[in-house]
Image: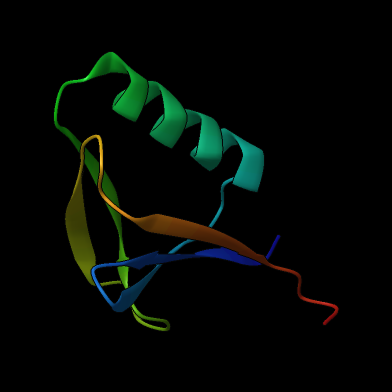
């Protein structure tokens, strides 16, 4: 994957340099633990601008792998 888009709270974030299944497992583990968890990522695309989103049960989040060939 070139990058992973994360849709959270109506906004788009991104993660690069990681595998989509790894990120999904991190989210699943965090939510399954039942404790709030901060996931670090990038705001939008392009120049890195660090952001943290709070993961907890009941919060809507989408993980979209972006293939560079598409």
Q: Which residue is at the far front?
A: 58
How many numbered badges does the structure rendering display?
0
Task: State whether residue 19 appears in this view.
Answer: no
Closer to the camera in the image, 2 or 27: 27
User: Residue 53 at x, y = what percent?
Assistant: 20, 53
Quadrant of the rendered image containing residue 47: bottom left
Task: State whether residue 44 appears in this view.
Answer: yes
Residue at x 14%, y 30% (from the top left corner): 36
Q: For the N terminus, which image quadrant?
A: bottom right
Colouring used for the render: rainbow
Q: Which residue is at the far top?
A: 33
Closer to the camera in the image, 43 or 60: 60
Quadrant of the rendered image containing residue 6: bottom left
Q: For the C terminus, which image quadrant?
A: bottom right
Residue at x 22%, y 20% (from the top left corner): 34
Closer to the camera in the image, 68 or 5: 5
Image side of residue 40 versus residue 14, left or right: left
Q: Is residue 41 shown above or below 21? A: below
Image side of residue 67 versus residue 49, left or right: right
Closer to the camera in the image, 48 or 30: 30
Residue at x 38%, y 56% (from the top left corner): 61
Residue at x 58%, y 34% (from the top left corner): 22
User: Residue 55 at x, y = what percent?
Assistant: 23, 41
Q: Is residue 59 shown above or below 13? A: above
């Amino acid at each position: 994957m070139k990058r992973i888009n994360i849709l959270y709270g109506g906004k788009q974030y991104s993660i690069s340099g990681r595998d989509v299944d790894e990120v999904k497992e991190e989210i699943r583990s965090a939510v399954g633990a039942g404790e709030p968890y901060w996931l670090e990522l990038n705001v939008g695309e392009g120049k890195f601008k660090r952001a943290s989103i709070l993961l907890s049960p009941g919060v809507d989040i989408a993980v979209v792998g972006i293939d560079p060939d598409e």
